[in-house]
Image (cartoon, helix red, strand yellow):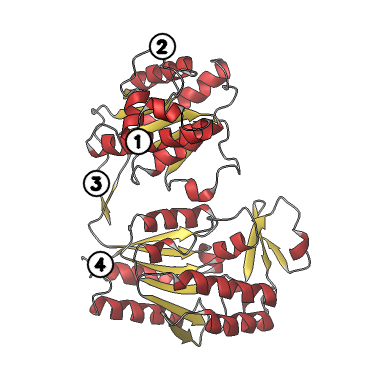
Amino acid sequence: MSVAEPSSETSIPSILVVGTGDTKFDELQYMAGIIRKAGGEPVMVDVSILSDPPYQPDYSRHDVAKSAGTSIEAIIGSGDENSAMALMSNGASALAGILHASGKADGVIILGGSMGTDLALDVAAALPLGVPKFVVSTIAYSHLVPPERIAPDLMMILWAGGLYGLNDICRAVLSQACGAVVGAARATVRPKAYRPLIGMTSLGSTCLKYMKHLKPQLEKRGYEVAVFHSTGMGGRAFEAIAAQNGFAAVFDFCMQEVVNHQNGTVVTSGPDRMENAGRARIPQIVAPGATDMVDLPAWQPLPAALSERPYHAHNRLIGSVTTSAKGRRATAVLIGEKLGRAQAPVAFLLPLKGLQEWDQPGEPLHDPEGLEAFMSSMRQALPASVALHEVDAHINSTLFSTKALAIFDAWVEQGIIPEGKL
């Protein structure tokens, strides 16, 4: 995948400024002024429900309601503030998509508390990768925001000290955010699909190494390769792009986020990890990399259920604990269920000699009994629709990567995957 040049420095980017003008008039007008000062053109989108703002927005709450296929009166009478804001989210998302497609929106900045952030996440998700998306939120970085609702290139900043009215702290935050979105709209290099894109998952080059061999080989074949770090948000971006049918094929070789979610840790990509490629009819070559480990925050005590398992602190943010044989059997069943829903070909590579760098003989997470429990369960759990390929090698071996490429090449010859463009 090649890229376009950044926007010209002389162009004036149009920035959607979304918020409830009836309650956040001062803040939104301040933001509009900063955007103009930074060289952008604010396009005001009002998502108020109960009353019009004391200024004339470019797109009123009535326009937003119409974009949702309804009226503001119907939205007000929909039941409660939750249902009303959900309808406004639908309208604002649809309107943002239309404005971007017609060349009237080069970026978006959205201001809100928890209610506004709920709407903001929908609006950001409605815009394609490469369109700057900035959310100023009272719950930025909070675990209240589920990973599955975060756009791959979303930017957030905490709306510190700004819940009601302007002050020096609030102005500092809002000015940073407005300057950032204008700068991003000027400088962004948006993806252009000149070559078919292959999505690949991994867990860093120390734990999983196959991408070092696979990426250059796929590039020689005329493909663009994007490798996603499977530590929660990386997998979320992978799933979001897959859901938009953004890949020609995937090498989903690190499933640890599935295990993380299964064990209730915050290092999750959401419940739909490993499902969107199959739903979008994208061919999948899959392997169970790092499914013997659960990642957790290193700054929290280990859960009681995992406290007796071997543990490794990767750094001060994240640590890993191995799962029991029982846990690995449950993971195998879950993987089989997810892959069974795929609506395109799936090849499953089972590396018989290990799933990550530290499970080999002599390494601290070596557990042959646990590995065998997973292997036997995985064979039983895979549905007939998934082609099983057992590889008598470790996942980090060249033999494993060579087998994956052989399957890929065969699928290209069969027309399952489009040919690369050199």
Residue type at mark 1?
Ala
How many numbered discs, if any? Answer: 4
Q: Please identify the quarter of the rendering in which residue 331 is found.
A: bottom right
The label on residue 259 is none
Kindly indicate whether the residue at mark 2 contacts the one at mark 1 (C-beta within 8 angstroms).
no
Mark 1 and mark 2: Cα distance apart in space: 23 Å
Amino acid type of the residue tagged 2 in the rendering:
Pro
Q: Find out whether the residues at labels 1 and 3 contact each other: C-beta distance under 8 Å.
A: no
Quadrant of the frame with the N terminus: bottom left
The residue under label 4 is 222
**Location of residue 153 in the rendering, given as x and y in whole percent from the top left corner:** 42, 45
Q: Amino acid at mark 4?
A: Gly
Image point 24% across, 79% down: which residue?
413
Which residue is depicted at the point 53% across and 31% down? Answer: 80
Residues tagged 4 and 2 counted as in contact (Cβ below 8 A): no
Q: Which mark is residue 68?
A: 1
Report the residue at 51% width, 32% height from top: 79
Q: Secondary structure at mark 4?
A: loop
The reply to whether residue 356 is visible in this rendering is no
Q: Secondary structure at mark 1?
A: loop
Of mark 4 and mark 1, the one earlier in the sequence is 1
